[in-house]
Structures are given as structure tokens and as C-alpha cells.
Image (cartoon, helix red, strand yellow):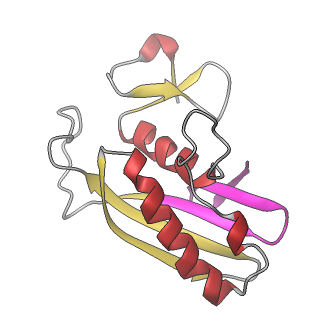
Amino acid sequence: MATIKEITSTDWQLSLRGAGEIEQKSADVNQCLLLIFSTQKGSDPLRPEFGVDLLKWIDRPANVAAPGVINEMIAGLAYEERVSVEAITAKIEDRAIIFEVSWGYAEGFNPSYEAVDNKKSPNITYFALTTEGGVYILTERSELILL
């Protein structure tokens, strides 16, 4: 994990993982997506349409909630112009719905510091809703962070 003294990118932000750490390059975009997906629509008074409305899907059956949440996620992506989403899939597990967002850089936003062929190696963002206490973000498929 990089620190403030190791910034090499114009696209960077403070990390949610710990004090003094930063996210940059595609990790910055990934964190932006997770912030959009985990912000309840209407909770940001300066941007009332920012985020997704997850609350209306609470207590719905998973097979009903998953497509609704995907639609909310797609609408929320209007706030991240750097990405072009290739697919959003939902996998219903024991006590969670795991969303996998496959994305590449939008035309005109592919930074020169990342040699990425969007068709061959998309970036993946994981996001989970659980019945055990709320919304989680997955920084990797096996790591859960409670928001």
C-alpha cells in the first residue's frame, strides 16, 4: 500500500484501509465505485442523487433484490465517468449477495500509467449485501470490510 510520499499518479485519494495510506490508479477508481455503491442515495446533502438506494431492497427475497440493486448500481455509475462497465453479476450465497462489477476505462480516460487492454483484462470490483449486519465491500473476493 502506498503512502502520501509515494504518490505517482494524478488520480489518487486517501484510502479507506488505514490512516496515511492512499489509493491510486485503478485502485482509486475501484474505491470510488465502492463509495458510490455504499452511499445511500439522498444522504449527501450537496449531491442528493449520489449513491444507490439500497434501503428499498432490504427484506426482499434475494432473487428479487439482486436485479433491483444491479439497476441501482448502474444508475449510480453516472458519477464515475472514468469507467465503462462491461458486466454486473450477482451471486446469491448463504447469507449474502455478492455483486461482481467488471469494468474498463471509458474512452478518453485510459491513463497512460496503466497498460490495460480492457477486452482482455477487465478490472473487477466486488460488493456484498449481507443479512449479518449490513453492507460490506470486498477489496478482494475473500476479504470483507464492514462499512
Q: Residue at x 47, y 10 (%)?
A: 5
Question: Taking 128 as reference, is 34 left or right?
Answer: left
Determine the residue located farthest toward the top in the rendered image.
Answer: 5
From the top left corner, tell me how far across and down residue 93 is, in percent: 67, 82
Determine the residue located farthest toward the right in the rendered image.
Answer: 132
Residue 118 painted magenta: no
Q: Residue at x 47, y 55 (%)?
A: 76
From the top left corner, tell me how far across and down residue 122 is, in percent: 30, 60
Image quadrant assignment for residue 62: bottom right
Q: Residue at x 56, y 51 (%)?
A: 51
Residue 133 painted magenta: yes
Question: Relative to residue 91, is residue 99 depicted above or below?
Answer: above
Question: Relative to residue 137, is residue 2 depicted above or below?
Answer: above
Question: Relative to residue 106, is residue 20 depicted above or below?
Answer: above
Give whichever of 122, 47 is nearer the camera: 47
From the top left corner, tell me how far across and down residue 30 is, in percent: 45, 46
Question: Taking 136 as reference, is 35 left or right?
Answer: left
| Range drawn in magenta | 125-147
